Amino acid sequence: MDRKKFTGIIICVLFLTVFFALFSEGQAQSKKPVGQAKKLSEQGDRFFGQKDYRNAVNKYAEATAISPNFPYAHFWKGYAHYYLNEHDQAVKDLDKALEQGYKPVLELYKTRGYSNYQLKNYDAALKDVRQVLEAEPTNVSFYSLLGNIYYAQGSYQDSINAYKKVLELELNNADVNYFMALSYAGLGDYAQQGLSAAEAIKKNTKFVGESYYLTADAFRRTKKLDEAIEAYERAINVKPELYEVYNRLADIYRNENRLDEAIATAKKGLTSYPNDGNLYLNISRYYSLADRHAEAIGAAKQAIQFLPNEYKAYTNLCRAYNDLKLYQPAIEACLKALQLNPADGETNFYLARAYDLTNRRDTATLQYKKAVDGLVDYTNKNPEYSDGYYLLGNAYVGAEQRDKAIEAYKKSLALSPKFAKARYNLGYMYFLTNDMKSAREQYNALLQIDADLAAKLKQAMEKK
């Protein structure tokens, strides 16, 4: 072999030796991060087992930073985010795990389904839940979740069907009866709402206060007011923080002309919600209806303190000042309310009344017209609220439209037959229009509701 060939072979061997050495080193370096990622993931597993989800997230994040294609670490990182209520990040990691072929995929669907539900990604949550139920057709928890998703979407019949499936699989599941009651409420099926809520209570649901509330609401909507009152009272006793119960119960007492109880109920709400301006708004109105005008002023001022930009608070103050014949502060309060809501019919009525009673009839006439327009609009939008028609009747009286006033008072009483002030005003309107038969009928009816007010009506008619 000549020297040149020999030298070439030596060079080639050296080259290959260097190449394989470099290749082996590269292979070692590429494998080294995978090993580190696994160790970090194992540390994350230990933190997860200890329920230290924050440190678990951190370790899984370190693992995926070293080895981005690591479905196991992405899944458990997403699961840890789920427990930390970091659902947006949970979904991102679970999506990544699914893309990378994580198994078992069913556990991924379960976790991601709950996270998507929490994020209100309802369509995405439905897809995950259906995947779970296809694989596990007797999974009670996921039929419940299916019902919750449909309820959140406003698909109330679908939610009911899902909850019924829960009851097929688990007859004594009390909480699902409560959720069914909510769904029936969404459908406007108040009979079934009441039955489902009562069944939830019977089975000792953990939502007992809420179930009493739904029972009461069903009674209220079907005009069974005594039963509604009892159920609302039970709801408050079981769960005093149920805010809406105080408003609903107090309004029933107002509707029944039980004004002291309406006031007491709203005040009871202040025990749980001491800084709630809306409760003070209602208390002020009830005080005015009960002719406790100084107290109405105090409650209105409290409402203003907590709701300085709420026009109704100033409207209530204006009304109470009017009732105490303090017309200048009444005017000031009404003008403040109208700065916040210029078209409000009730406020325009009280302002008109203050002008009228201070001998500014021309100005009052303009305000009465605004009051009528505003209250016609209000009653069109709130046809089930008796006070609106009562106030409209008052505005028509101020505008000297007695026939229309009578019709408005009649509508008010059709909604609230025990509304004493509306019956007083209707009786007096009949008297002024020389319909004495109807006036006496209103007096006799008022006598059964409020004997003192009936006596005032009789005195007013005799004085005239």
Image: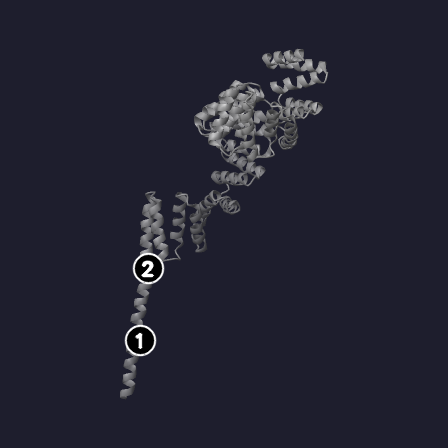
Q: How many marks?
A: 2
Residue placed most toward the observer, 314 or 185? 314
> Tag 1: Cα neighbours inside 10 Å, few (<14), some, or many (≥20)?
few
**Three-letter amino acid code of the residue under disc 2:** Pro
Q: Residue at x 39, y 57 (%)?
A: 68
Question: Does residue 431 lie above or below 396 as drawn?
Answer: above
Q: Quadrant of the N terminus?
A: bottom left
Residue placed most toward the observer, 192 or 24? 192
The residue where tag 2 is placed is 33
**Three-letter amino acid code of the residue under disc 1:** Leu
Q: For residue 372, what is the image quadrant?
A: top right
Residue 207 drawn at (x, y percent): 47, 30
Residue 373 drawn at (x, y percent): 65, 32
> Tag 2: Cα neighbours inside 10 Å, few (<14), some, or many (≥20)?
some
Residue 395 drawn at (x, y percent): 64, 26
State left or right for residue 41 relative to residue 379: left
Q: Say if mark 1 contacts mark 2, CB within 8 Å.
A: no
Name the image colouring.
Answer: one colour
Q: Residue at x 59, y 26 (%)?
A: 350
What is the secondary structure assignment of the residue under circle 1? Answer: helix
Q: Is residue 202 visible?
A: no
What is the secondary structure assignment of the residue under circle 2? Answer: helix
N-terminal-most mark, 1 or 2: 1
State how far apart marks 1 and 2 are (Cα): 26 Å
Question: Does residue 302 lie above or below 448 as drawn?
Answer: below
Tell me the number on the disc at residue 159: none
The residue where tag 1 is placed is 16
Q: Residue at x 41, y 43 (%)?
A: 85
